[in-house]
Image (cartoon, grey):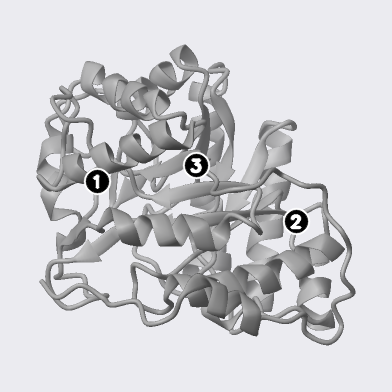
Amino acid sequence: MNRRRFLQGLSAGLLSASCLPGCAHRPRPEAGTGIKPIRGSWISIWWDDDRHYYWNEACLKWTATQWELAVRDMAELGFKYIVLLAVAKSGKAFYDTAVLPKLEMACEDPIGALLRGADRHRMKVFMSSDWYAEWDERALLDPERVKKRFQMMEELASRYARHRSFYGWYWPNEACLTPYYTENFIRHVNECGAEARRLMPKARTLIAPYGTNKAVCDATYMRQLERVNVDIIAYQDEVGCFRMTPAQSAVAYRTLREAHNNVPQRALWADVEVFDWEGPPNRQTSRLIPARFDRLHAQLEAVSPFVDEVLIYQYQGLMNKPGSEAFAGHSESATLYANYVQWLRRRG
């Protein structure tokens, strides 16, 4: 397929960036120089459209051993974090719950297998809270949906909190920055956070908004950062979705860094998109395929000066260790993996 050409260099993007009015510059501790490596990834058990075509059916056939091996493969790359995309989809759950029927899979308990693998390899898992029903605006605050969401969170905590790798929660009803959060989204995040603290007081919480190309640093956004009660915000870099080039993402993350410097209780992470498209971009009928490594390298270079950690969407299906028994995805995923490993070795 025709891959995107990147028309701007990173240095040009950085030279054009400036701190917007209302953002006083505050020095932040040096996190080291150079390009940050990937430290974690989203993972899905099943998705219900063609975007996950190359790994959906394979993952439904995975055994518990293969789910654990998938965790091992990520740990070998130095990943520390796993973010579970969803605990249910299209009315079928991925674990035994009173809320929904269970999806038919070869593995009786893939969530448990992921956590066991993460326990063994000292990784940290953010548990999803949702997607038992189709997403729409009601998903945030509709009383019946909130009740079921909290019921599932209580089930998940009761069943899995014994795992030391159960590190936190991910709220998957993603916000779109416009460039601000809606009041409904802030309320949703704060209600979920309060429930998470009730169930697991030490758990960390994560959101991953999109609309990063609209990022601003002003008094309104900083007030929202103070009000939204979440520990980590991993903004989507939107390069895979063709909303920004790497150079443009550097400008956006520099702007966000200035905002977060003023509200340091909200950690700033990146959600780097490592996918390209086999068909027209941003359609549910188009299949995701691995990006070229030179693009991924540019993405990592763009965000590294500004973020605390780099996550990707996603290792599964798009970066596969050659010969792994937990191989699921496009054949070129092995190439992206190999190129990334070569870069890690050169980096030292």
Query: Is 192 above or below relative to 151?
Result: below
Q: Residues within 10 Å of mark 1 (few under 14, many from 20)?
A: many
- Nearest the eye: 42 or 152: 42
Task: Tell me whether the residue at label 3 lies in contact with that at label 1, contact meaning CB atoms closer than 8 angstroms.
Answer: no
Which residue is depicted at the point 75% across and 54% down?
Answer: 266
**Along the polypeptide, which appears first: circle 1 or circle 2?**
2
Q: Is residue 69 left or right of residue 175?
A: left
Q: CA distance from mark 3 to mark 1?
A: 14 Å
| Residue 263 visible from this viewpoint | yes
> From the image, which quarter does the N terminus lie in?
bottom left
**For marks 2 and 3 on the same chain, the one whose residue lies earlier in the sequence:** 3
Disc 2 crowd, CA 10 A, few/some/many (<14, 14-19, 20+):
many
Residue visible at 69% across and 74% down in the picture: 255
Q: Earlier in the sequence, mark 3 or mark 1?
A: 3
Circle 2 sits in a helix, a strand or a loop, which is it?
loop
Task: Give the camera-side residue of 345 and 326.
Answer: 345
Q: What type is the residue that disc 2 sits on?
A: Asn
At mark 3, the secondary structure is loop
Residue 52 in picture, x, y percent from top left: 19, 54
- For mark 3, does the 10 Å Cα neighbourhood hold few (<14), some (14 to 19), or many (20 or more) residues? many
Instruction: Tell me the residue that label 1 is attached to.
Output: 336
* Disc 2 from disc 3: Cα separation: 28 Å
Q: Nearer the viewer, mark 1 or mark 2?
A: 1
Residue type, numbered disc 1: Leu
| Residue at (65, 76) in percent of width and height | 181
Residue for badge 2: 229
Residue at the disc numbered 3: 37
Q: Do callouts 1 and 2 mark residues in contact (Cβ within 8 Å)? A: no
In the displayed structure, 258 sits above or below 199; it is below
For image coordinates 83% across by 73% down, the residue present is: 223
Residue 325 lies left or right of residue 110; in this view the side is left
What amino acid type is highlighted by mark number 3? Answer: Pro
